[in-house]
């Protein structure tokens, strides 16, 4: 089998952010369902949290291409 | 791999990789990303100049579009992140960053251009450097050198024994890593999105032409899915411009905020 083991690092680094982003949007949906008028405020916070949680997966992706 | 890889003369399929982003110079060292970058500056500049040259109380279509963009950045991004009077001086930066990144990202969707400029890491590095200078400069100007460092690395209400751990971590995360994550997030999203599209389109083409009977079914499916993915990418392209601007505003807002 050919390939680069650094790609596995990307797979591993995507697990944590995947769970984290799932939790963030689950909370966002919950909050919007309970209080629909708070949607605008919650949306900004949810996207900010999403962007911050995503950083680790991004590092994984970049490093997968760096160590080739 | 120096040119976008096409499965030439029916040989092995070569998956697209980093090499697919190395463009040969068009003339004298000028490459496609450079041309797109200049084009984006012209588009943003001419759009705002043409829209706001003759501003009137009852806006026309162009003026309405320009004012909507400005309103969106001010109301949906700026006001949440930077409080009160502090927003006004930084609004031009936020609007510029948002429109510039948006136009550059959407180049990935426009036919014949089909390349998000931000998939080239140099461009996000440059913008992140400007943002880093601005938010640190704003903090220095507001709190003074010592005050600003204390503001960023000395969160109030932390127990004394954990300070030796928290303060270096806050310094690393607030001063050193922020520009890195800011630029890498934009770059990697555009890079990965473009790469996925390349895999679907080149792979679909290879399956269709060289894949036999099964490929005749799988190839068109991949090509149709690539169109769906392209619209998905359009959402991501907008979202990344939004996130970049929002994080910029959040960093500036955090730097100029008063102690509480």
Image (tube, coloured by chain):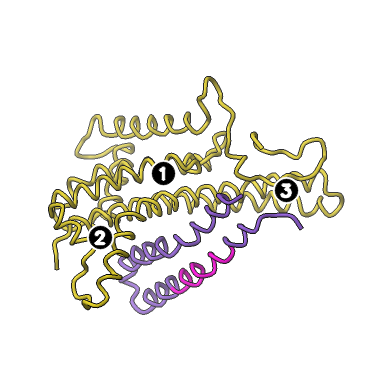
Chain colours: A purple, B yellow
Residue at 83% over, 49% down: B211
State the extent of the magenta-drawn residues as a range: A11-23
Q: CA distance from mark 3 to mark 1?
A: 31 Å
Badge 2: chain ID: B
In the picture of the structure, the residue carrying the numbered disc 2 is B80
Q: Is residue B148 above or below residue B68?
A: below
Q: Position of residue B94 (x, y in %)?
A: 28, 46
Residue at 44% over, 70% down: A25
Q: Which of B241/B20 is in front? A: B20
Q: Is residue B110 above or below residue A6?
A: above
The magenta stretch spans residue B118: no
Residue at 46% over, 68% down: A21
Badge 3: chain ID: B
Which circle's residue, 3 or 2, is located before the other in the chain? 2
In the picture of the structure, the residue carrying the numbered disc 1 is B124
Q: Position of residue B111 (x, y in %)?
A: 56, 37
In the picture of the structure, the residue carrying the numbered disc 3 is B204
Which circle's residue, 1 or 2, is located before the other in the chain? 2
Nearest to viewer (mark 3 / mark 1): 1
């Amino acid at each position: 089998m050919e390939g680069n083991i650094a790609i596995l690092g990307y797979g591993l680094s995507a697990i944590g952010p995947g769970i984290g982003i799932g939790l963030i949007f689950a909370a966002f949906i919950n909050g919007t369902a309970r209080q629909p008028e708070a949607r605008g405020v919650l949306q900004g916070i949810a996207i900010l949290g999403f962007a911050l949680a995503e950083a680790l997966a991004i590092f994984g992706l970049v490093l997968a291409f760096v160590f080739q | 791999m120096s040119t976008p890889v096409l499965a030439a003369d029916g040989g092995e399929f070569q998956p697209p990789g980093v090499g697919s982003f190395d463009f040969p110079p068009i003339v004298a060292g000028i490459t496609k990303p450079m041309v797109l970058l200049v084009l984006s500056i012209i588009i943003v500049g001419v759009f705002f100049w043409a829209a706001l040259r003759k501003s009137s109380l009852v806006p026309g279509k162009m003026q309405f579009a320009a004012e909507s963009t400005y309103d969106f950045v001010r109301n949906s991004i700026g006001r949440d992140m930077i409080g009160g009077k502090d927003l006004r001086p930084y609004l031009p930066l936020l609007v510029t960053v948002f429109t510039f990144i948006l136009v550059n990202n959407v180049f990935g969707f426009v036919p014949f251009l089909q390349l998000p400029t931000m998939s080239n890491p140099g461009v996000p590095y440059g913008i992140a450097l400007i943002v880093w200078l601005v938010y640190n400069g704003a903090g220095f100007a507001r709190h003074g050198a010592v005050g600003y460092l204390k503001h960023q690395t000395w969160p109030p209400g932390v127990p004394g024994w954990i300070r030796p751990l928290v303060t270096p971590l806050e310094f690393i995360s607030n001063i050193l890593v922020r520009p890195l994550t800011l630029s890498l997030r934009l770059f990697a999203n555009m890079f990965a999105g473009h790469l996925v599209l390349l895999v679907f389109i080149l792979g679909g083409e290879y399956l269709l032409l060289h894949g036999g009977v099964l490929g005749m079914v799988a190839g068109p499916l991949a090509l149709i899915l690539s169109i769906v993915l392209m619209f998905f990418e359009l959402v991501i392209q907008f979202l990344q411009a939004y996130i970049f601007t929002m994080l910029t505003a959040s960093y500036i807002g955090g730097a100029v905020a008063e102690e509480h």
